Image (cartoon, coloured by chain):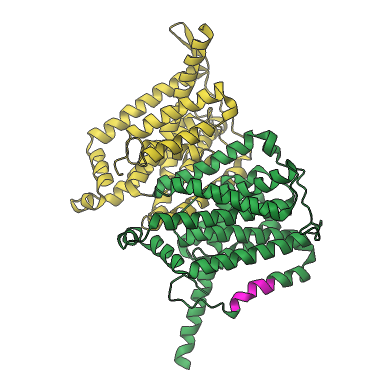
Chain colours: A green, B yellow
Amino acid sequence: MRHNGSYSADSRISWVEWLPWLAGIAAFFLLPDFLSLGARILVYVMYALSLDLVVGYAGIVTLGHSAFFGFGAYIAGILAARLGWTDPLIQLVFAVAGAGVLGLVTGAVILRTRGLTLLMLTLAIASILLEIANKATGLTGGADGLSGVTIAPIFGLFRFDMFGKTAYWMCLVALFTSWWIVRRVIYSPFGASLVGIRENFVRMSAIGSPVYGRLLSVYVLSAALAGAAGALITQTNQFVGLNVLSFESSGELLVMLILGGVGRIYGAFVGPVFYMIAQDQLAKQFPEYWSMGIGLLLVVIVMFARDGVLGILDRVIAFVRRRRQPAS
Amino acid sequence: MQEFIASVVSVAFHGTAYGMILYVISVGLSVTMGLMGFANLAHGVFAMAGGYVLTTAMDRFGIPFPVSLAIAFGLVAAASVVLERALYARLYTAGELAQVLFTIGLIFIAAAVARLIYGTLQQPVHLPEYMKGQFSLLGRDFPTYRVFIIAFGAVMVAALWFGVERTRFGAMVRAAVDNRGMAQSIGIDTQRLFMLTFALGSGLAGLGGALGAEIIAVEPSYPFEHLVYFLIVVAVGGLGTLRGPFIAALVIGIADTAIKYWVPQFGAFLIYVATIGLLLWRPAGLSGRTA
């Protein structure tokens, strides 16, 4: 299942790739008590997918991806709580457009730089948004968070119920759509050129690839996806807190992505599932040990398994195949 | 008018003290990043550790303040050598992403350890009597401890300048920053150099954290919360230099204090915007050598 987006790779959808969706649908019927957690997991998968595009494929190391997620979340929240635009799909459209524009404006600026400066700028942009959200209490509710977010039924038919059934379906459909878009992008020549830029920036410039334009396009796409995920988290929680914009949020997301495997589309699926279930079970009881565990896990992954859970899986499969070959 | 001048003097004074702390903490980060190209986000961990060492040494073991400062420097430097040899050194050739993730992992671990040992409350600093009073100069009173910080910072600046610009060791560091391969090929043991500068830089961060424990509260969220400021000092100042971060730290210290005093509603917003503007104008910082 390794997809490096190379141009020659077989781009047909293999049967294995339908499994996550079957699991998603099965979870709805088998685990009715955990639907709101499930919806949040789906949102984070989508968010991780958007980060994977920039970090994993294009090689832009960012610490400020929460800017887009948070921006989308606040757009949806403010539309609902302050302007009374409660239709979830309209909120989603505005969040996507808003985050996309933010991605275009900030990306046009920061993608001219590289390395530490780029890292610093992404962090600074997320910090600016956090600062604005913190101070503009009239609009955002400040540190208390934005409450009173009411969401109208989808198409006027499906109400957002307290068990999270509607939210779950909406997130699943949204995730499926983003997965389809991301997959198409990765397998396109455009996706192949992104991997090229990641692997060798100078050489891609030298052979005439419009590096800046490519990076900016993928940055905007990723920002828009993150914004959509943000709007969905607002609709799922019916609340927006400052934490959606925090550095910890970006850091946590990076942890989820590296846990699953960076630079592979399904790494973004596996990581959040493991992380959020573990967090749901452990974080409240043992907050100290939880963050220590996350830290240790990160160090171990970076030291020994830089391609995450799916990378380990790949190696196990390769190992088993090699063992089998002499026998056959 | 009289009042306005008084507030300007006060802001400049407190801002300078804050800037000195920022400098002592961040200068090590600038040098190690310039030298090894290592994106060390966990630098604040060393500063926090210095703060905890100081308060523990003074409160639990009754060690005098100056000795505690020295212990904070020594212990943090020693611990950082262990970390450097065991972990950091393996990642020098790894990509930026691996370094970023690894150091974020260190922050998580350090914050958890700090919370387990000391709890979430900030650590109070019990300064000795001779640091508590006021110091009068030109008819104005200044808190003695801030005066001490500024004087101490100035001495550190002079010592660092001398060490880097006038000693053999400093010449080796400068050579390795400019061109690592060339430095290595003329017989400079760059690995040993890395280790020593890393220890020195981390020790200085520990010293800065200890010295500034009264200004920048020592608590488990320290390395996350102040990371942006340390990085701004380094990025704005430029990598691998001493002068750039010094100017950057002073400007940020004073600007931050001034904003908090006169226009608190802006918070850190103006500083971030100014940083972005400056980095667009000069991506390598004020005195960065590589474009």
Q: Position of residue A179 (x, y in %)?
A: 59, 66
Q: Residue furthest bottom?
A: A328
Chief secondary structure of the magenta portion: helix
Name the side, left or right, on which B189 lies relative to A103.
left
Closer-to-camera residue (A290/B94)? B94
At 53% from the left edge and 25% from the top edge, which residue is drawn? B259
Closer-to-camera residue (B252/B174)? B252
Q: Residue furthest left?
A: B186
Closer-to-camera residue (B24/A60)? A60
Above-or-below relation of B248 to B93: above
Q: How many marks?
A: 0
In which image quadrant can residue B166 be found? top left
At 71% from the left edge and 60% from the top edge, which residue is drawn? A39
At 52% from the left edge and 38% from the top edge, which residue is drawn? B226
Above-or-below relation of B76 to A182: above
Which stretch appears magenta?
Answer: A16-23
User: Any magenta on residue A203?
Assistant: no
Name the side, left or right, on which A318 lies relative to A16.
left
Name the side, left or right, on which A22 lies relative to B92.
right
